Amino acid sequence: MSQPAAVRLRGLLDALAELTVAQLRDLPSHRVEARFDCLGSGEQHHGFEGPRLWDVIRTAEPRVDLVGRKQRLRLLLTVTGADGHLAVLSWAEIDPDFGGQQILLATSIDDTPLDTPGPQLVVPADRCGARYVSGITEVWLGPAPDPADRP
């Protein structure tokens, strides 16, 4: 029997974690209906359910000053799928003080559980489906490079 799919949480976190889809279901769940254009399959419309990325990251105790604001704008999240597909999000997209978007790590699509393939990143505000990463294996939180370090 194969191991259940799991997502590793890494980076600026005090509690590095690995969460299965079942453990993600223990977090507060949200449902979104999303429409997006897929380059290979055309227009897509699906119902997704799962925790917000914000809630998932908060379980790993991010080393982030949630009182100050400007320093949070340097933070990035990368979400990687089992096939190597990677998407980048800014902290401000998920932070309620800024964009507060309902970006999900979906545990089901159209009421079909994603326990075996793993969760899917859902960015309902995106018209293009390129950031809908399937089979997520890792979420990393870290700072953008310092402009002073650039050539």
Image: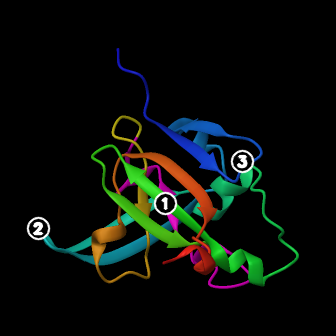
Distance CA(mark 3)–CA(mark 2)? 35 Å
In this orientation, does residue 38 appear?
yes
Single out the mark in the foreground, 3 or 2: 3
Q: Do the residues labelled 3 and 2 touch (CB within 8 Å)?
A: no
Residue farthest front in this picture: 151
Against 125, residue 13 (above or below) is above
- As drawn, the label of residue 60 is 3
**Residue located beneath label 1 in the image:** 78
Residue farthest right in this picture: 67
For marks 1 and 3, the one nearer the N-term is: 3
Q: Residues within 10 Å of mark 3 (few under 14, many from 20)?
A: some
Distance CA(mark 1)–CA(mark 3)? 15 Å
Which residues fall within the magenta stretch? 93-114
Residue in front for this viewpoint, 102 or 82: 82
Badge 1 amino acid: Thr
Q: Is mark 1 on a helix, strand or loop?
A: strand
For marks 2 and 1, the one nearer the N-term is: 2
Using the rendered view, name the quadrant where residue 133 is placed.
Answer: bottom left
Residue 97 covered by magenta stretch: yes
Q: Are marks 2 and 1 in contact (CB under 8 Å)?
A: no
Distance CA(mark 2)–CA(mark 1)? 23 Å
For marks 3 and 2, the one nearer the N-term is: 2
Residue in front for this viewpoint, 111 or 59: 59
Using the rendered view, name the quadrant where residue 116 is placed.
Answer: top left
Position in image of residue 126 (x %, y %) = 38, 81
